[in-house]
Each structure stands twice: as C-alpha cells, then as structure tokens.
Image: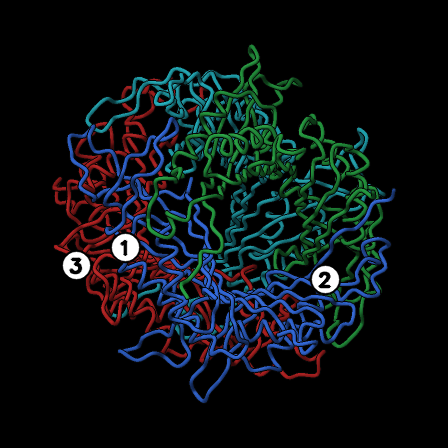
Chain colours: A cyan, B red, C green, D blue
Amino acid sequence: MPNVLTHNSYGKSAVRLTKVVRAGSVHHLFEIEAAIQLEGDFEPAYLAGDNRGVVATDSVKNTVYVLAKEHAFDSVEQLALILARHFVATYPQVRQATVEMTQASWRRIDVAGTPHDHAFTGGGPQRRYAKAVMTRGGEGGGGVLGPVLTGGVRELLVLKTTASEWRDFVADRYRTLKDATDRIMASKVDADWAYNTLAADFPAAAAAVDSAILTTFATRHSLGVQQTLTDMGGAALAACPAIDSISFELPNLHRIPFNLAPFGLAFENDVYVATDEPYGLIKGTVSRGK
Amino acid sequence: MPNVLTHNSYGKSAVRLTKVVRAGSVHHLFEIEAAIQLEGDFEPAYLAGDNRGVVATDSVKNTVYVLAKEHAFDSVEQLALILARHFVATYPQVRQATVEMTQASWRRIDVAGTPHDHAFTGGGPQRRYAKAVMTRGGEGGGGVLGPVLTGGVRELLVLKTTASEWRDFVADRYRTLKDATDRIMASKVDADWAYNTLAADFPAAAAAVDSAILTTFATRHSLGVQQTLTDMGGAALAACPAIDSISFELPNLHRIPFNLAPFGLAFENDVYVATDEPYGLIKGTVSRGK
Amino acid sequence: MPNVLTHNSYGKSAVRLTKVVRAGSVHHLFEIEAAIQLEGDFEPAYLAGDNRGVVATDSVKNTVYVLAKEHAFDSVEQLALILARHFVATYPQVRQATVEMTQASWRRIDVAGTPHDHAFTGGGPQRRYAKAVMTRGGEGGGGVLGPVLTGGVRELLVLKTTASEWRDFVADRYRTLKDATDRIMASKVDADWAYNTLAADFPAAAAAVDSAILTTFATRHSLGVQQTLTDMGGAALAACPAIDSISFELPNLHRIPFNLAPFGLAFENDVYVATDEPYGLIKGTVSRGK
Amino acid sequence: MPNVLTHNSYGKSAVRLTKVVRAGSVHHLFEIEAAIQLEGDFEPAYLAGDNRGVVATDSVKNTVYVLAKEHAFDSVEQLALILARHFVATYPQVRQATVEMTQASWRRIDVAGTPHDHAFTGGGPQRRYAKAVMTRGGEGGGGVLGPVLTGGVRELLVLKTTASEWRDFVADRYRTLKDATDRIMASKVDADWAYNTLAADFPAAAAAVDSAILTTFATRHSLGVQQTLTDMGGAALAACPAIDSISFELPNLHRIPFNLAPFGLAFENDVYVATDEPYGLIKGTVSRGK
C-alpha cells in the first residue's frame, strides 16, 4: 500500500510587527510577534511539488503587515481575529487558519511624574498572548459561533517569600525532600483563557485576569502550587465574565535553602540557591460550572 | 455553579542525567534531559491543598536517577519506557505517565585515527528524542498493547546550496516573492515517529531514520519544503519497518539573496543574508498505507 | 625555550543567590547572580597540577552564600565590595579579586493600591550591575584608595516613536540607506559608571542615573544614537555626583519601515518590521572634565 | 569644567553572511557572523549630531556582503583581514577597525559513504573565530607589521569520563567539597590564538590547534582544569608554528555525583547530575618562550 499524508499544515512564524498609532501627540505602541498556520487542500504541494494552491509563507508574512496597516485594533485578540478570518475568507483552499500572537510589555517612561507621550521602557518579561482559530463554515454557517478565541499571558513572574507550604506528600523510597511549612514559592505563569464572546473589551479583560492572578498569588496562603493554581483560576473566572475557563502551566522555580550547617550558621529562611533546572511543572484547567 | 477542575497534571522537567556505562576500558556515555508528567487522582491537592496522594516532583526527579542506576538501557526509548511503566505500576493514583527525553550528541574524540575509549566531543546540535506514554490498564489488560512509544530527532540541521526550487505559488495582492528555480534550502528538522513495536533495536532504528532523512534531503530535487517533507517521510518509512508513521516540523531557515545591484554587481547564487526570523514552518505526517 | 604561562585567573560564575531580609512583616528581596575571578600565585596548579594553594571554585561559591548570610547589604555594590575585600584579605596567594554581580528587577505586587509586604512580580528585563576589583595593597597601603568600584545597569529597554533622525552621513558606494528625519529609535542600554566614593547611597545613586538616562532619552531630540549617548552620559554625571564617568554600549534595535508600496499603501511612520540582527552597536564614555 | 568624551567606537554586529563557492559541481559553504567596530574622528557625531564623517552601520553591513562577493577567501581569518584593511584604507577618519567573525560548523552529508557535493548537516556547536585589528599606520609604516590577527574556536565541547582528579586544594572554613581521584571533566572550550604571520594556511592552522586541544584533553591525565589548560596550550604551540600564544576560557561544566545513599545504592562513577550553573571558569594564556 502506498503511504498516506495524514496531516499537513504550514505557515509563517516569528513575524515581528511594530505598529504606532498616533492620537494627536500621544503615540500608542504595539510590538507583536505572530505565527500563522494554514490547513486545507495542500496535498498537491506535499505529494507532487505542485504549489499552485499554496499561499507562500512570504505572502502570509506580508499579509500581517498589510492588515495591521489597514485595520485599527486595540489588542492581539482583535488582530488575531482579523487575520484568521482573512485567510479563510480569501482562500477557498484554506480550511482552517490558526493565528497566535504575543505582545511585548512596554510602559511609558515617567518624566517628572508624567507618563511620556512617545517614549517607552520595558514593562516586564510578561507578554500578552492571543490565539484565534477560524474554521471554514465556522462563521454564520448554521448557528456556529465563529472563530475560537483564546487570550493569555506568558512569563508573568511571581515570587512570594513566605505564606507557602509544601508538606504531607507521599513518603516512600523515592522521597528525600522534607516537609516545609515556610518556603519561597516562585513561578513564571503561562495562562490561556477561553473567551465566551468575540466582543469583549480585551485589554480590560486581560488586565482583570492578570490582576486576579497576581492578587491571589500574593494574598492566599499556599499549601502547594496545585492549590494556588486552582485559587488563581477561580479568581480569574470571578473577575472576568468574558471567559469560561482558564488553563495554567506553572513552573515551580525552586529556591533551595542553602545548607549553612557546615559553616556553623543557621538557616533562617534567608539565604537560598536560585535554580532554573530541574523544575516542577504544574498544569491545570479551571472551568466555570454549568 | 461552582468551578470545576477539568484537567490536571504535574511532574518534573529539565531533569538532567549523565550515566556512564563501563565495558572494560571502553566507556559509554548517556547525557539525557527528562520531563515527566503524571495524571490521575490529584484533585485533593488542587482543590484543598491535600497533598497526601502527591508524589513530589522532587521524588519524581530522584526516581529518574535511581532507575537509571538500577536498569541497563541502550536508548532514550528504553529508559522512557522503564520510567513510564514504573510510575503507573508503583502509584495507584497515577492514571497516566508521560515521559519525554532528549539525548545530547557526543562522539568519541579521534586520536590518531582511533576513537578514544573515554573522551568525547560535541557531535552536533541534533538530539535523540523519545516519548513513552503509559496508561493504567494499557499493558496486558484486555489485549491492549501497552505504552505508546514515540522516537524522534530534534534540531537536525540540513542545508543544500542547489537543487531546490520554489515557484508557481499563488499570485495575488499579497505576493511579492519571485519564482526561484535555484535557491538554498535549509532547515532544522524536528521529527517524531510512532513505533509499532516495543522490542526494536532503537539505536539502529533511529540511525536508519536519520540516514533516510539526510540522504533524501541531499539527493532528491526539491520543488518546496512541503514536497521534501513527504519525500523524507516516505524514505524513513521504507528504511525502518519498526515505525508506522512520521511527523515533521520543518522551519524554513531562509537564506535571502543579497541585493548586489546597487553596487554594480550581479547575484550569482553566491552571497546571501542568513536569517532566523521570520521563518516558514512546514508540518506534515506521513503514514504507512493500510 | 620552554613555554611561559603569561596570564592566569580562575573563579566561579553564575552563582545564584536569593536573600530575604525581614523588616517586621515587610520582606526585602535580593536575587543576585555573581561571578568571581581570582588572580595570584596559582602557577603551581597550572604548571604541575599542584593545587595546594587553590581555593576551589566550589569554596568560592560557598563564600558567596556565607558572606551574604553574615553581612547586611543594601545593594550589589556593597556585597561585591564585601566579597572582593574578603578574598584578598583571607588568602595571601590572591593578588586581585574581581567580583561582578547582576541583580534581577522585582517589584512588589500591587494589591488594591498597596504594595504587598512579601509578594513580588517581575519589574522588567533590566538588571542592576556592580563590579568591585580589589588588588593586594590597594587598601590603606601608601595612600591608595582601595577597591575600584563600578556600578551599572544591563538591558534597560528604551524605545521612542518619534523625535529621532539619522541623516547626512557618508554617501559613497556602500551606502544604500536614505536620510530619515523621523524614525523609531530603540535600544537595550548597558551602562557602567565609575564611582568616586565607596560610601555612596548606592541604590539612590543608581536610581538617579537610571532616571537621567530615561528622561534624556525621552525628552531630547536625537540626531543619532551617538549624540543621544553623549546626552545621556552628561545627564547622568549631572544627576549623580558620586560618579566620575559613564560608559555605554547601545545596540541600535532597528525598526525598519515595512515597504507598503507593492500593496498600494503609504508608509506613514506606522508599520515597521522589528529586527534583532544585524544591529548597530554604539559605544562611548563620557567623563567629568577636570 | 565641561564633560569629555574619553572613548568612542561604533559599528555593526550580527551581520550574517552565507557565501557559496562553486568549484564545478562541488560547492563550498561559508556561514559567517561578523561584528565590526570603527574608532576614529567621530566626535562631531557624539557631541553635536554632525554625522557627515560617519559611515552608517548599514553601510558597514553592506560592505561585508560586497567584499565577500568581490574577494576569494578560504577562512574567517582572510575575510576579517580584507575587511579590517578596507575600512582603514577607505576612510581617513577611521583610525582603527576591529573585525570579529565566527563561522558555523557544517559538514557534508554522507551518502552511501561519499561526502555529498552540495548538501550539508550541522557539524557541531563549535565555531571558528577570527579577529583582525587594523590600525592606521600599522601597515608598511615604519616597519610595523600590519594588522593584528587572532584565530580561535568557540564552544568546542569536551568531556572525559575518567582520568581526571581534583584534590589537595585549600582546606578551610569555606571548603565542603571532598577530594576526587576519579571524576568527569567537561568543558566548552573557548580559545584565542595570536598568529605570528598573515600568510599562514589558516584552515590547516586552526585544524592543527583543534586537534592538539582534543588529543591532549583525551590522553593527558588531569589533576585539574588549570593543569589541562596549560597542557592543551603547550600542545597547540607545538602543533602550530604559525601561532605565538594561546588563551583559554574553560568553563568547568560540572557533573555532580548523584547521592544514591538514601536509596540504598552505591555511587560507582556512574550516575551524575549534569549542571550548567554555577560553573567554574578557568582562564590562562600560554606563550612561546623567547
């Protein structure tokens, strides 16, 4: 039997767009990295090198800049929607378009107490994230809602120096870690949330989720990253009616007590070794009950 | 309605193991990075901070080293299987264990024409990859075959300076790229293949697939990365009976002709700008016909 | 003639320290990465493997944690001084100790308008930097002032969307870039400054320099990165009497106008391609006149 | 007193060049990353934004491609020399040009035992390095020899599983590490060597040095990284008459015995934790005696 091409998709990644929007003397800055994948009737290219139906990835890249020029948007959610709809609407051979975007954090430079009109500095490692998946027939066709839209945040750093425990876990041959009733907990939060509407105020929605995550992390006593994940998820759902579920990937960025005993000193929750690897990785999805 | 925890898993990532196996004066070196994720009855930890059923990620990490000590293995495939089976067999609360591993490429230092017994140098950026997924009841239970085993390679660099074209693709408003009948094609191959047996000679199988990929890339004229993907997949299936399908993610690492016209010089397929971003990303799965 | 060892030094790099200082319920967080290099009478180790005079790099690493435990400090400048002096004072075979440190930016999580006591989020990619170089005989010996102390900042991101030009540069065969009278200017500022005192309020000094850099970048019209460098240096010297000179390494993080002409659209300083490479790199040192 | 500009230089970094040279059907591939810095009479640009003497970094970048087109070269050493001489010869305002280059390792794909004519795969993480520094008046002027030329290698990975010790180092309060008479030694060699001629066969010279480093690392018993550095330096000087000194930066990539005691198992130089940080960093320069 001959081989079969059982899946295919292609597109352009790491498309880096800067857009400046001028509202009088006040400039708004978007710095976005986009990745687009197209699925559809592309077997001729894969099987025979017949590229007549293929939109070149270079053209896909051009499209990002052209549509960013032609459309106003306030968020990566909006721009991802614009692009995902475009590819399905424009090319009959495209069955599904997936657009992912991250947006860098810039904040206005503070000059004598006033945020500057057109000068910015880095706002933190965290980046906004959005994903829009548009499937042919998904919009307007038979009651289907249209594109599936995900929002998110990447690499939102958090660390608390107390109010975190880790104890009473399985004790067996493979355990060497002791119970801890007061430890540092740190993570680099990746969160994805499912919007239940395409008409949300996306910047406000994302800000509400971020704030819920940070506030919960800061103020809720933690018995483990797992519990904190659920707490943060619940707070996000409570804070943002526009989302129906939220998924987390939480690396546990371990801060390990430095063994001061050989030096005649006592560890007093004060001196730690910061490590990147290995790291715990805790995942979970919290959804609105129905 | 209260919120619901609709998914959860956890484990340890970036566990870095070095194992030396001594066959007389000849030493064999394994340098492996492992990531383990466990799924199962862990809701009490997520919902209430009740960790009594949780195997700490630190214990998961310990397990990698202990089992690497206690078991002989010839490949990441074998060690991944050992670990995936261990977690399901040992902990009733674990419903599924996913073990992913990559292995660094070391080759023996050549000393006056002879590979050295115990000294090594970097063998390339490419790394072996394996994933074993063991599900409770998956082994011996009702005819189910057991763990699902994937092999693979990561970051296998390839570049050819000719015998590659890209032409006749969609011409519309968004196209600016011209047809090319002679271009550089370069990629960093990520491939995953599905084993149809747990008893293969895994190093030989992986070597056969790698060789099929490299030889096909070198010797087959290319009308596009899509076609080359299918060609490489077919060659891999032909070369390795132990696999039933192979998936690729092929970034198109563009080498762009440098525009020499302003300097009164002609481009003769000789001087290019090497770029990392943006990059095309071509995906596909080739499966054995049935 | 036999070979000669004409230089040697050794030490430990990437020592990652977390220190928590508790002022009642308010916790202060230091996350520091240190690199130490020692020079001195270590030829026996290099020439004959006689390590009796060598302080192991593992001991150097231990020393960072022990001294961080035993000493209070308010800045990387202070801790670098403590360590540099320690190595020279403790080991007669050490002729010079160089301690470099960077400190991650954390800021308190804002909870309902109030900075939290013990929970933090990432404050930006920029990091504090300090270097202390202590040479034997450098302190108290014959009027010499003591350690040489450098402060600095690493990866302070800045971007302005207007008020930046680049024009009238050399026009010859190799030039293809046109004059620009309104462009984006972006950089990731690395700055090092030379303290003229070991008794400064280092956090205040560094904050004053950072603020001078940011304010100047935002408010001064720029005819080029070179001019902006000098302007920022002058402002830093004016703002911080505790420093005598300041050196910059300013990558020019190009934002390139996207060519909209093929699409029938006009570039209006709005849509750019963000690039990381290649990048201009502009260096310079501004010193107080004497 | 007004401030003074006490140093300045500028240029372009991360210029990525691919050049293909065709010798009949056999293609030779150069993939090079270049960084150029120019020093000279550029104060007007720094002090007043007067850029009339400034060669734009974009023009510097263009020059790399144009000269790579117009000149044959067999090595980064030759191309670095061509560029460094060009900038000083072409622009009277340039007092010194520093050109640094690294070259990626590609090797021909082996097809049925034969290296392929035009298809390549990654040859390892190591990269060739060269630096040429040309100073005005440095060539032909008053007996001065001309450009200063450095060759080198970056990230040459080495690891040996035995024949390496580390013992008898300073025992004091800060030491916790035990003597080791059989350990793994691993490093990522960075070496720079000073050529004593501009007319060497550079590929042969670099290959001879690499081989001396690898062979010495493999075959010489080691009492420490320091001793191994000196041994490798001596071997390099013996193998390559075209160089007069060689400098190393050797990170000690620690492989730490995994503590098997809690699991009732014995460590037998077999199971280690691979770590990247912290790392020892051993430096030294070995020069020919005169």
In this rendering, do the residues under marks 3 and 2 share a single chain? Answer: no
C-alpha separation, residue under disc 3 versus residue under disc 1: 12 Å
Residue on which disc 3 sits: B201
Q: Nearer the viewer, mark 3 or mark 2?
A: 2
Q: Nearer the viewer, mark 1 or mark 2?
A: 2
Q: Residue at x 52, y 26 (%)?
A: A237
The kind of residue tagged 2 is: Glu
Q: Position of residue B234 (x, y in %)?
A: 30, 69
C-alpha separation, residue under disc 1 versus residue under disc 2: 53 Å
Q: Position of residue A174 (x, y in %)?
A: 22, 29
Q: Chain of mark 3?
A: B
Mark on residue D39?
2
Horizontal placement of B136 versus A85: left or right?
left
Categorize mark 2 by other alpha carbons within 10 Å: few (<14), some (14-19), many (20+). some
Taking C22 as reference, is A128 above or below it? below
Categorize mark 3 by other alpha carbons within 10 Å: few (<14), some (14-19), many (20+). some
Residue D36: quadrant of the picture: bottom right
Mark on residue B279?
none
Taking A240 as reference, is A67 above or below it? below
Categorize mark 1 by other alpha carbons within 10 Å: few (<14), some (14-19), many (20+). many
C-alpha separation, residue under disc 3 versus residue under disc 2: 60 Å
In this rendering, do the residues under marks 1 and 2 share a single chain? Answer: no
Q: Position of residue C10 (x, y in %)?
A: 45, 45
Residue on which disc 1 sits: B151
Residue A164: quadrant of the picture: top left
Taking B213 as reference, is A31 above or below it? above
